[in-house]
Amino acid sequence: MTDVTVRVPAKVNLLLSVGPPRPDGYHDLVNIFHAISLFDEVTAEPADELTIELTGATTAGVPAGPDNLAARAARLLAGRLGIAPAVRLRIDKQIPVAGGMAGGSADAAAALLACSELWNARPGRDELFALAAELGSDVPFALLGGTAVGVGRGEVLTPLPVSGTFHWVIVTADGGLSTPAVYAECDALRARDPQPMTADVVAAAEAAVRAALAAGDVKELGAALGNDLQPAALALRPSLRRTLQAGVEAGAVAGLVSGSGPSCAFLAESAEHAELLAERLGGAGVARSVHTAHGPVEGAAIRH
Ligand code: C5P
């Protein structure tokens, strides 16, 4: 048995359409995920017991104990296999933490894949995706990568065709936002100010993003981006308004809060334009860190 390393991408949401709360506490979504070139790496190596080691740029606030989502992934898979989770997981983190970029979900997906390989388990694709969905709504997409629409909790995925590559600037903020808190704020805002939301409106929003992706049209995509969690993220973190405004002033095609935030994603016209935007946003005093990235990229994959 030798070490297995899996590289796994962050995501941004091109469209996040949130339905009313369900009896189980989740929300039905139409969630268009887009995997971008910010990566974590998870290495699984044989050990006497399950341990987590964190390295990399973004480890602050990540649990190094049994609550780490990668540790839960290892325990879940080992439980299914009827073996002990005897693995040391080394997580090299570059994806912003609690930032709305699914970094924890990415690590869970990577750990599932790395442990499957290490333990020579190789579950079938359906089984692997079912285990991923048990771990979290965004974990299946981290396995799949590319660009995909997720319905249900976001875990029922259909890949979407994309022409070419889109270029992004990701601006992170100090301190994370709790995903359940942002969903709860979204419910509270809607209870105070109900907005009629019909299936037609959601279908049209989805169609607009799909058409822009298929055409590879950056202006069209910019006009079609949408995130129902954005008002809630802005209510909980008013400073994000300045971040979004700074993106407009810097010349971004469009900008939005990524998922439940507080990271913001700005669409650029080209790789060069993304570098220029990043430079301007870095000097605008609104960011903890600024990254350029492109998408779509592949999902969790073993590094050979
Ligand atoms: O599935 P996951 O554990 O990543 O979800 C984290 C939290 O986000 C949930 O506990 C829930 O509060 C919220 N959520 C939701 N509806 C979804 C996905 C997540 O309300 N479809």
Image: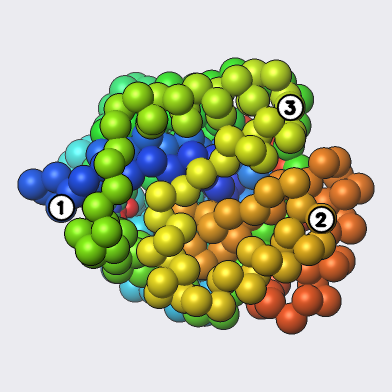
Decide if residue 8 is on the left or right side of residue 201.
right
Give the vertical position of 241 relative to 130 (above or below). Answer: below
Q: Residue under label 2, please give it.
A: 251
In the figure, residue 94 lies in which quadrant? bottom right
Q: Nearer the viewer, residue 46 or 194?
A: 194
Q: Residues within 10 Å of mark 3 (few under 14, many from 20)?
A: some
In the figure, residue 182 lies in which quadrant? bottom left
Q: Amino acid at mark 3?
A: Asp
Q: Residue under label 1, please give it.
A: 25
Q: Amino acid at mark 2?
A: Gly
Look at 73% across and 59% down and name the residue there.
Answer: 248
Q: Residue under label 3, please give it.
A: 217
Residues at marks 3 and 1 touching, judged by CB atoms closer than 8 Å: no
Give the vertical position of 139 relative to 211 (above or below). Answer: below
Q: CA distance from mark 2 to mark 3?
A: 17 Å
Q: Residues within 10 Å of mark 1 (few under 14, many from 20)?
A: few
Residues at marks 2 and 3 touching, judged by CB atoms closer than 8 Å: no
CB of mark 1 near ligand 1 (< 8 Å): yes
Q: Which badge, 2 or 3, comes first in the chain's sequence? A: 3
Q: Amino acid at mark 1?
A: Gly
Q: Which badge, 3 or 1, comes first in the chain's sequence? A: 1
